[in-house]
Image: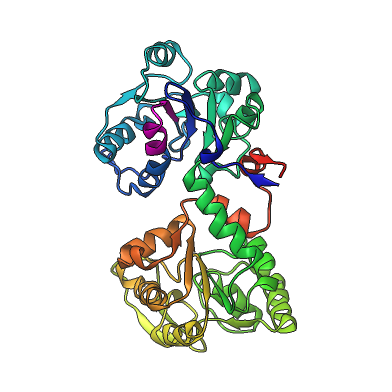
Amino acid sequence: MHIKSIKELELQPGDSVFIRCDFNVPLDEYGNITDDRRIRAALQTIRYCLDNECKIVLASHLGRPKGFDEKYSLKPVAKRLHTLLKHEIIMAKDVVGEDAHQKFSQLQPGEILLLENLRFEPGETKNDPAFAKQLSEFGTFYINDAFGVSHRAHASVEAITHYYDVNHKAAGFLLLKEIKYLYKLLQNPTRPFLAIVGGSKVSGKLGALINLLPKVDKMIIGGGMAFTFLKALGEEVGKSLVEEELVPEAMKIMEEAKRLGVKLYLPVDFVVAPELKEDAPVKFVTFKEIPKDWMGLDIGLASTRLFREALNDVQTILWNGPMGVFEIDKFARGSIKLANYVAESYATKIIGGGDTASLISKAGVDDEMTFISTGGGASLELLEGKELPGIKALMVED
């Protein structure tokens, strides 16, 4: 089984191509895009179709609107695409309505039509075959280049593929790259292989931890989830985030790591504060000295040094989840220091998850990473060993 690449399709000048992109980008209160990484990631596939003189129809969702809502319109995306591609973008006022069809009927080879937010239509999230059939009318060929939603069985990702035969559907360059780095990494990593797993909760990463453990040589656990592990070891963690019901699971993971010979690292010191506020007073304490009424909000200097030592000999690094509340500068130092140490490594460095990508960007080391995944939930499900509906739908027999 393999996934067909867009390069394997016989695209002819004048063919219409429907590309499912992931333009779910963050916007500020004025509707300005604050991070266009996902839009830039889609450009290679769009340019390839332009070079083949195709008629191009782009589709994406943005946010989680319940029906039509102007603040979730893809107009800011059309504007940014125009800037990046230096090419006119025709914007439809609806998804499968009169305006979209009228504009599509007039589309010329080498022109780009962007449909409105797919989630304005209830059929999208319901994986409705009738809605998917309407979408399929916008393209002789179907391309999925939206890894970020490939873990969702939605109409534009899964149901639509049933209206195309194997010669008319494929993966775009971004989706192929995501699969190459994340999927193949888990199958055959260059060793030693280190996973850095952070973020606030163990519950969100439990499946990934269990699936990764037999595949890695070393694992660093940081962020809020580290306190559930420290609690399992009987340590005082104060008011730090702990998922009590997962303390036995944390213990099991540590025991399994020992049994498998995986070197498991936990933070040895923290930046603590009485509350999560920008102006809160902070203390630097070891993991043995967290005050009862304080909470750990970042890893300390000794932890970053320890983790740096762990990085020394590794050949592959997978990082999913920050080490602290990096959105607040005073609790971002540990994560940023670690990002710089990872950047200095000669290993293959793969970043998974939106928060980690934002952190890498904040640290200014994007260019030092081998690959930064655009899919948060999708990359996590892949790390958990789950089959993604959007990828399964493109699989063809060898």
In the depicted structure, whether residue 115 falls above or below residue 341: above
150 sits left or right of 67 in the view: right
248 sits left or right of 125 in the view: right
Q: Residue at x 30, y 68 (%)?
A: 329
Question: Residue 193 is drawn in which quadrant?
Answer: bottom right
Model colouring? rainbow
Residue 111 can be seen in this image? yes
Q: 269 or 385: which is nearer to us?
A: 385
Residue 245 can be seen in this image? no
How many labels were placed on the picture? 0
In the depicted structure, whether residue 79 falls above or below residue 375: above
Question: Does the magenta portion include 158?
Answer: no
Q: 389 or 380: which is nearer to us?
A: 389
Q: Position of residue 252 (x, y in %)?
A: 73, 75
Which residues are drawn in magenta?
46-58
Q: 332 or 117: which is nearer to us?
A: 117
Q: Position of residue 251 (x, y in %)?
A: 70, 77
Q: Residue at x 69, y 74 (%)?
A: 253
Quarter containing the C terminus: top right
In the depicted structure, whether residue 172 falls above or below residue 98: below
Q: Position of residue 317 (x, y in %)?
A: 51, 72
Q: 200 or 108: which is nearer to us?
A: 108
In the depicted structure, whether residue 145 falls above or below residue 363: above
Q: Position of residue 156 (x, y in %)?
A: 56, 30
Q: Residue at x 43, y 40 (%)?
A: 45
